[in-house]
């Protein structure tokens, strides 16, 4: 399970962990809010414009929805910098490895998002020019909506993969990562959440009386428009209660902590309360009476879900982090050992080098290694000839020559006999021929 884990990067964090955790939670919540409005708004504009083929009032509503999308897109991109940078600080090894394993698909996000944005701008700024070519005009927003629906597959498969290093051996591409447990349920849970938030937002947006009157709609009332978006919010929130259990059941057992089991029932109860209020709003004579209580309750729900998401991530990675710390400590200990006899012998707390080892490194290591060929043969091949006989090595070092035709002759070693003996004893000890 842990064999795949790389060693950690032994660098200090630029800020306390609690501060970085707070940043990632707040910036991610803000980012995902506008991502949801971007995705849901694009879908809402598409369907409203399709309805507008029969009723011009819906075409006017679609245009108004489209006018908000560029703001949501830009805000989502700007706010996405925070969580992206912070996740690269707190989860460097995991996030980077997941990026590599999903490969080209992860890099394609930039191209897909850019293309979707361009299609969105084409849709917004050609509304009048393509008024008589509705098929072409609708294709712009349909293309943008399709891309916005595809991109979360890449992002979620990557984020899911970073949580479970034990799966890394089996992943060869994005398609492997896509079918791992938890990705598809998370996708539908996110999409329904995006549509639900969008329905709630546009219920308020078109429910403002003075603003709605400025639209000069002929056949649709303010109550009807608000109710349509409330219905969208109600259906999507209800769908989340359906997809939520699938999301929970596909979590690996070790990622489920007690906090999750305590908080999820609270979320379910609050979501049911929101559903009741939405139902009453749909049938209310005066719209938006319960809007702000719905918003406050959903804000609490979103806050809990952001925390739960972070808790699942930390719980999933915890055993791997423990293993990685152990590997890092072992690696750094070996580095100190190497420095002990190369840079500052015995000075950095590693295993002290023997006098013979130090002499070997200074005088012999340029031509000889224990287990590989350099200028001279591997000592593991030579030492058995002198097993238990360090004086034999000393005699050879004092009067060397050429015994192997595929190696050059060895020059005499200008060391005192006692130092030559220390080197010889080290060679026999290092090769197991004492």
Image (tube, rainbow, N blue to C red):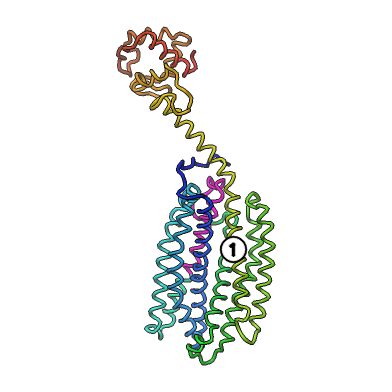
In the displayed structure, 207 sits above or below 7; it is below
Magenta: predominant secondary structure element? helix
Task: Answer with the quarter of the image where residue 378 lies.
Answer: top left
In the displayed structure, 48 sits above or below 20; it is below
The residue range painted magenta reads: 146-175
Residue 272 x, y percent position in the rendering: 68, 70
Residue 81 x, y percent position in the rendering: 44, 60
Please identify the residue farthest to the bottom as the structure is shown: 218
| Residue that label 1 marks | 303
In the displayed structure, 26 sits above or below 330; it is below
In this figure, what is the number of numbered marks? Answer: 1
Question: Was residue 147 drawn as part of the magenta stretch in this picture?
Answer: yes
Asked if residue 3 lies left or right of residue 9, the reply is right
Q: Nearer the viewer, residue 355 or 46?
A: 355
- The N terminus, quarter of image: top right
User: Which residue occupies 68% across, 65% down?
Assistant: 268
**Residue 176 in sight in this render:** no
Residue 338 x, y percent position in the rendering: 43, 28
Residue 184 x, y percent position in the rendering: 58, 60
**Residue 317 in sight in this render:** yes
Task: Answer with the quarter of the image where residue 227 lies.
Answer: bottom right
Question: Was residue 107 drawn as part of the magenta stretch in this picture?
Answer: no
Element type where label 1 sits in the image: helix
Asked if residue 259 lies left or right of residue 7, the reply is right
User: Which residue occupies 48% across, 14% down?
Assistant: 433
């Amino acid at each position: 399970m842990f064999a795949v884990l790389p060693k950690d990067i032994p660098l200090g964090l630029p800020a306390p962990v609690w501060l970085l955790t707070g940043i990632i939670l707040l910036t991610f919540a803000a980012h995902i809010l506008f991502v949801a409005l971007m995705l849901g708004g694009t879908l809402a504009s598409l369907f409203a414009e399709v309805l507008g083929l029969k009723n011009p009032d819906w075409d006017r509503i679609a245009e108004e929805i489209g006018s908000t999308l560029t703001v949501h897109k830009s805000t989502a991109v700007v706010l996405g910098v925070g969580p992206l940078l912070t996740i690269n600080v707190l989860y460097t090894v995991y996030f980077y490895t997941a990026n590599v394993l999903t490969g080209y698909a992860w890099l394609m996000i930039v191209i897909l998002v850019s293309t979707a944005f361009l299609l969105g701008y084409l849709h917004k700024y050609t509304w009048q020019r393509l008024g008589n070519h509705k098929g072409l005009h609708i294709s712009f927003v349909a293309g943008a909506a399709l891309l916005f629906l595809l991109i979360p597959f890449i992002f979620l498969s990557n984020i899911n993969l970073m949580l479970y290093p034990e799966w890394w051996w089996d992943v060869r591409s994005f398609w492997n990562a896509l079918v791992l447990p938890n990705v598809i349920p998370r996708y539908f849970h996110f999409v329904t959440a995006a549509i639900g938030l969008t329905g709630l937002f546009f219920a308020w947006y078109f429910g403002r009386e003075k603003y709605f009157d400025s639209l000069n709609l002929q056949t649709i009332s303010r109550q009807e428009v608000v109710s349509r978006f409330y219905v969208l919010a109600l259906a999507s929130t209800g769908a989340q209660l359906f997809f939520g259990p699938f999301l929970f059941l596909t979590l690996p057992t070790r990622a489920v902590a007690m906090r999750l089991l305590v908080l999820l029932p609270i979320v379910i109860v609050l979501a049911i309360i929101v559903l009741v209020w939405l139902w009453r709003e749909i049938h209310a004579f005066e719209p938006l009476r319960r809007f702000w209580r719905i918003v406050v309750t959903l804000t609490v729900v979103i806050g809990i879900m952001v925390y739960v998401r972070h808790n699942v991530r930390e719980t999933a990675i915890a055993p791997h982090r423990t293993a990685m710390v152990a590997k890092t400590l072992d690696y750094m200990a070996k580095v100190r050992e190497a420095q002990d006899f190369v840079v500052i012998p015995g000075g950095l707390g590693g295993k002290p080098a023997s006098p013979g080892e130090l002499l070997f490194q200074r005088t012999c290591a340029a031509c000889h290694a224990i287990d590989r060929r350099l200028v001279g043969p591997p000592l593991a091949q030579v030492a058995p000839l002198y097993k238990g006989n360090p004086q034999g090595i000393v005699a050879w070092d004092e009067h060397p020559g050429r015994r192997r035709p595929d190696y050059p002759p060895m020059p005499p070693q200008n060391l005192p006999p006692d130092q030559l003996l220390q080197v010889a004893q080290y060679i026999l000890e290092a090769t197991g021929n004492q």
